[in-house]
Image (cartoon, rainbow, N blue to C red):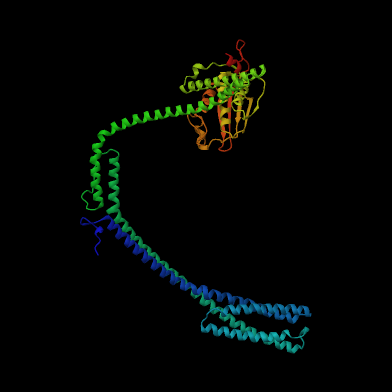
Amino acid sequence: MRLPYLRFAGAWSIRARLFAVFLLLFLLVMFLGVQSLNSLNYSNEVSKQVRVRWLPSTRALGDLNNYTTDFPAAVAAVLRSRTEDEKATLRRQLSALDRNILGAEQAYRQIVHDPTEDEMYGRFEAEWRSYRAVVSRIELLPLGGGDESETRSLVGSTEGLYERASETLGQLTERNLASAREASQSSDRAYGQARRRIVLTILFAGLFAAGAALHVTRSVSAPLVELASRMHRLAANDTHIEVLGTARRDEIGEMARAVVVFKNNAIDLSENRQALAHQASMLQEKLSEEQRVTLLQRNFVSMASHEFRTPLGIIDGHAQRLITMRDRLTPEDLAERARKIRSAAQRMTQLIDNLIGSARLIDGSIEAYYRPVAVDAMAVLREACHMQRELTPNAQILESASTAPLLVRGDAHLLLQLFGNLLSNAVKYSPSGGLICLRARPAGGNLVVAIEDSGIGVPEKDQLRLFERYFRGSNTSGIAGTGVGLYLVSRIVELHGGTVNVRTREGAGSTFTVHLPVIRSASPSEEILTPQLRMEH
């Protein structure tokens, strides 16, 4: 039957060549398997004789030699016994030896032997039975041995019988050991022959495989590698290449001719490539900028609506109460509600100031608005906690700080924004009602402020980028935020000559620690500024 696909325009195709090579390799593997199985079967048959016949026979004869050797000593002990109890104990020992000897005999009889061995073993059994019959008569003698002449006669006969049985067993053992050695040597020879056959077969297979690999490499692999090299150079805009193999009448020739077509097309396209790349780059830059602006706008709208909703709700709620209860409110109630409305309005003003400060920081012009004076940092911390509690009444913020003033040189407004952002993040990324701990203490000329939360923490892969602009952790989806809060924190801390670091683990909360340099006292003409004074100014 003709196989058309094995021919390619009058030449053997690559598929046909590979099919022939793999078919020969398959036949070679089958031949190797058959040869190996035959060698292993031959070796196994020889070694099986050692395992099944000679090793068990040697073990059984060894047991017989051991037990029969112990028997005369046990008989002598019976003759020397002085009491009935001692004699009964010794007779039980003889019975145990009888059982052991019987077990060894049964083990030996279960093994197939040649007629000579069977004849020698039958002679041993007969001699041992004769010896054992005389021993049984000795066991029946009374204590002290009875008639001395009869005892000597019995003992003398047992010695002759035991020696004959022992000699026969020794001859049988020597023959068994000699046969076992011969079988072991035959097994070694069979193993050596099998190994030589397998080694020769492997060498032959290796030579054939090497020839096949050389053929495939020269006729298929090398031309394909060379063609791939030309294609890589062509992909790198090297159109000054010569494509080889176009005259071949197989698949490689078809590929070479296709590469020539691709080369001609590449030459035509290379003239417009740089212009298209330049235009694509400009479009990509514009698209990236548009996406960034759109993202910032969306984040701003989301943040602004979230941040302004709470104070607006407070103002609206108290205004409605004033309208519905105007006839029943006392002046004190009116003053209290007006104070709450004013506090909410101040919170909105503060939020607007924060947004303006954030914009200035992002634009890089914050230094123009930085007015460093002596600031009571403890008052700033208390004000930040107070503002956060007003914004989120259910927040649990635990302060651990001295009430005594501690002065730093800086901008009270920026410092309030710094600690407000850290507290806001701690509340936002912690479970509702989660405990927030703020600890402040002087240490080594610095004010050390640590804000610890029990929130979601930061994944390890995100920690190095935590203070980058617009970066948010991969586990913050669904939580409102712009990604500029911690960037603003790092800029404000840097502006005040301090440092900020974080210790965090995903799912186990975070601790942000700020170090700010402290000053001993303000200058005589300088007023110590607090957040309240700042707002009044």
Where, quadrant-wise, is the C terminus in this rendering? Answer: top right
- Residue 159 position within the rendered picture, expressed as x and y whole percent measured from the top left: 67, 84
Front-most of residues 251 and 62: 251
Front-most of residues 498 and 416: 416
Give the answer, above or below, for where 259 lies relative to 154: above
Position of 200 compared to 91: left or right? left
Q: Residue at x 30, y 52 (%)?
A: 221
Q: Is residue 59 visible?
A: yes
Front-most of residues 350 and 100: 350
Give the answer, above or below, for where 70 lies relative to 352: below
Q: Is residue 242 visible?
A: no
Give the answer, above or below, for where 10 lies relative to 160: above
- Residue furthest out toward the top: 525
Where, quadrant-wise, is the N terminus in this rendering? Answer: bottom left
- Residue 38 position within the rendered picture, expressed as x and y whole percent measured from the top left: 41, 70
Image quadrant assignment for residue 527: top right
Image quadrant assignment for residue 206: bottom left
Q: Residue at x 48, y 31 (%)?
A: 471
Position of 387 compared to 142: left or right? left
- Residue 154 position within the rendered picture, expressed as x and y whole percent measured from the top left: 70, 87
- Residue 143 position within the rendered picture, expressed as x and y whole percent measured from the top left: 78, 83
Tally the numbered discs: 0
Give the answer, above or below, for where 372 lies relative to 162: above
